[in-house]
Image: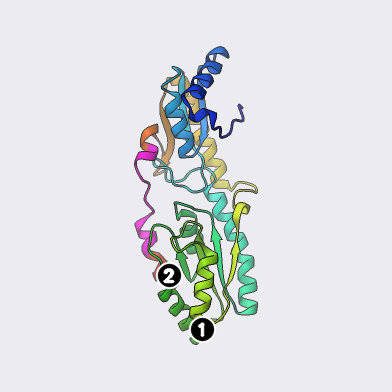
Amino acid sequence: MLTTGRSEEFRTEQGLEKAAGVLRDERFDGVIAIGGDGTMHGLHALKQHWKGQLIGIPGSIDNDIYGTEYSIGFDTAVNNALQAIDKIRDTAESFQRVFLVEVMGRHSGAIALHVGIASGASAILIPETPTDLKKIAQKIISGREAGKSSSIIIVAEGEETGGASVVGEKLSEMVGEKCRVSVLGYIQRGGNPTRYDRILATRLGVRAVEGMIAGLDGVMLGEQACEIVETPFEKTWSVKKELDKWMLSLMDELAT
């Protein structure tokens, strides 16, 4: 294991050539790299300086990499967030409060979407869809009048209004009560991986080694419809990964 991390030097032509020189000097035949779109960018750039084999494996809790239905770490992050929200719900119901829970996702609402649907949230705010605070406020007020004493609203950190803190301040004024905010932050990244993530990592890792032996080069391996598929590095970031439209349609329907 090389245990490498982000490096500003690697973003330069000199840094790329230095890395290629190390690989040549140490007689590497190939490198399997696990990471997000930055890693795939790096592998693509390194390919211009080194003739060895390069294979990528998607590892990103944001699940925003094109070429795979799920990336390693996403399922674990969602489950970590769900466990925290279950605890927050106890407080929300006991004290009859509105809670806004912010989850990770600066450019992708995948975590918020899955967490929101799985937790039965009253609303889900993500970068991919416009936020209608008036509609959300009315839903809270109507729910209160119908006897619903508490609400959980899931907010992706990249939501266009400005995140949970800003949304919380605006909603508090609109509904006439203080809305509490909880930012889960890096708690989503830690902990033991789920069964799904362990098996996904094993399948992709084994296939990457098999591919390396067979001469595979210049692609990321992902999973689509339970099958391992190959995607050229450049396509993993040049093609935008869209959220499931059917799941997006469920947001309002289930909350209602």
Q: Is residue 122 visible?
A: yes
Give how far across and how far down residue 147 sits, in percent: 52, 85
Q: Secondary structure at mark 1?
A: helix
Closer to the camera, 37 or 118? 37
Q: Quadrant of the N terminus?
A: top right
Mark 2 vs mark 1: in front: 1
Instruction: Tell which of 195 and 222 is nearer to you.
Output: 222
Q: Is residue 192 left or right of residue 223?
A: right
Q: Would residue 256 be visible to someone looking at this image?
A: no
Other residues around mark 1 within 10 Å, as few (<14) / some (14–19) / many (≥20):
some
Give the camera-side residue of 51 and 225: 51
Q: For the point 61% across and 51% down, which residue is it? A: 186
Q: Residue at x 64, y 79 (%)?
A: 95
Q: Is residue 5 above or below residue 118?
A: above
Give the distance between the C-alpha atoms of the residues marked 2 and 1, in whole angstroms: 17 Å
Q: Magenta region: which residues?
A: 236-249
Q: Is residue 89 above or below residue 3?
A: below
Quadrant location of the C terminus? bottom left
- Mark 2 burial class by Cα count in 10 Å: few <14, some 14-19, many 20+: few
Q: Where 19 sits versus 107, above or below?
A: above
Q: Which amino acid lies under the numbered mark 2 shown in the image of this protein?
A: Leu
Q: Which residue is mark 2?
A: 254
Q: Residue 173: image x %, image y %?
A: 51, 78
Question: Are the residues tagged 2 and 1 within 8 Å (C-beta)?
Answer: no
Element class at badge 2? helix
Identify the residue shown where x is 56% and y is 35%: 6
For disc 1, the marked residue is 144
Comparing 11 with 110, the one in front is 11
Total number of numbered discs in the rendering: 2
